[in-house]
Image: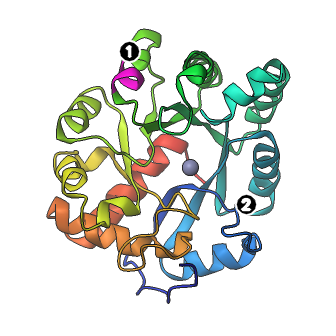
Amino acid sequence: MSGRPPAPSPLPIAVVDNHTHLDIARDDGPAPDLAAAIAQATAVGVDRMVQIGCDLPSARFTARVVDEHPALLGGVSLHPNEAPRLADRGELAAAQAEIERLAAHPRIRVIGETGLDYFRTGSEGVAAQQDSFRWHIDLAKRTGKALQIHDRDAHEDVLRILREEGAPDRTVLHCFSGDITMARECADRGYYLSFAGTVTFKNAKGLRNALSVTPLEQVLVETDAPYLTPSPHRGATNAPYLVPFTVRAMAGVLNVDVPRLCTAISDNSERVYGPW
Ligand SMILES: [Zn+2]
C-alpha cells in the first residue's frame, strides 16, 4: 500500500527527524519534492531533519542539498549492504576516498549509516561489512562527527566492534531494534537510541520495553523515510511530517508529557549534531 496519509496535528515544540532519506522514491514513484517535504514537516513541528546518504549518488545528493535547505543537516556513508558490493567490484577504496571528501563539508555532521546487516547480506559479505564498519568508526573519530549505526540482526557484533574500536563521542543507534537488555547496555555506554515508526507497531512490545528504560537524555526519533511508516498508517509511504505519530506514542511509553519529550528530543539532537 502506498498513498499519502493526512497530516497529524502539530507537535507543541519542534523536533528533529534524525534519520531520513529524502532522495529515495518508493514503488518506482517520483522522488519527493524536497522543498514541499520540508515545508510539510515544518508545519507539524518537525522543522529540522538529518538527510542520510548511504551510497555515492545519495551522499553527493546529501552534500548538495544541505547547502540549499537550512532545515537539513546531512550524513554520508557506504551502507553495510553497499560496501561488500563495492569491494567485489574493486571500487571500495575510491568510494571511501569520496565519502571522506564529502564528509569534510561543515553541514555534514554524521558518518553513517554504517554498521552490520546480517539480514540482507549473507555470510560471504560479513568480513567486508565489518571492515567497512571499522573504517566508518575511525572516520567519525578523525572528523569529530557523530556516528549513526545500522544494526540488523547483528546486535552482538555491533556492540563488540564498537567496544574494540572505541565508539566516537556521539554514537547513535539508528532505528533501534534491540531488546531491553541491549537498550540498558547502550544507555550505559552513553549511546543515543533513535526510535522509528517500528516502535508504534502493534507487535513491537519488546521495542517499547527497550524505549521504556532509555534515559530521556539519550532518546531520539526518526522516520527512516520512505520506510517504516508509524501506526496508524503502517504500509503507506513515510515522510518526515509523520514523525508526530511516533513522538506521541513514545511519550506514552516513556510516561512523560509530549512537550517534555519534544524538548528532550530537540536538545538531544542538537547535542549530537550541533546547531542547525
Ligand atoms: Zn536509513
Q: On the rendered structure, is 89 left or right of 269?
A: right
Q: Is residue 127 magenta?
A: no
Residue at 36 percent of width and 68 percent of height: 246
Which residue is more in the foreground, 100 or 175?
175
The chief SS type of the magenta part is helix
Percent coordinates x, y for residue 187 in the rendering: 26, 34
Local SS, label 2: loop
Q: Amino acid at mark 2?
A: Asp
Q: How many numbered tags mark residues here?
A: 2
Percent coordinates x, y for residue 23 in the rendering: 73, 60
Percent coordinates x, y for residue 69 in the rendering: 74, 63
Q: On the rendered structure, is 230 left or right of 184?
A: right
Do the CB atoms of the residues marked 2 and 1 lie less than 8 Å apart?
no
Residue at 20 percent of width and 70 percent of height: 257
Magenta stretch, residue numbers? 156-160
Residue 250 lies in what quarter of the image? Answer: bottom left
Residue at 64 percent of width and 57 percent of height: 21
Farthest-out residue, top: 164
Local SS, label 1: helix
Distance from label 2 to label 1 (Cα)? 33 Å
| In the depicted structure, whether residue 58 falls above or below residue 14 | above
Which residue is more in the foreground, 54 or 140?
54
Residue 171 is marked as none
Mark 1 lies on residue: 163
Q: Earlier in the sequence, mark 2 or mark 1?
A: 2
Mark 2 lies on residue: 23
Q: Amino acid at mark 1?
A: Arg
- The colour scheme applied to this rendered structure is rainbow
Which residue is more in the foreground, 142 or 7?
7
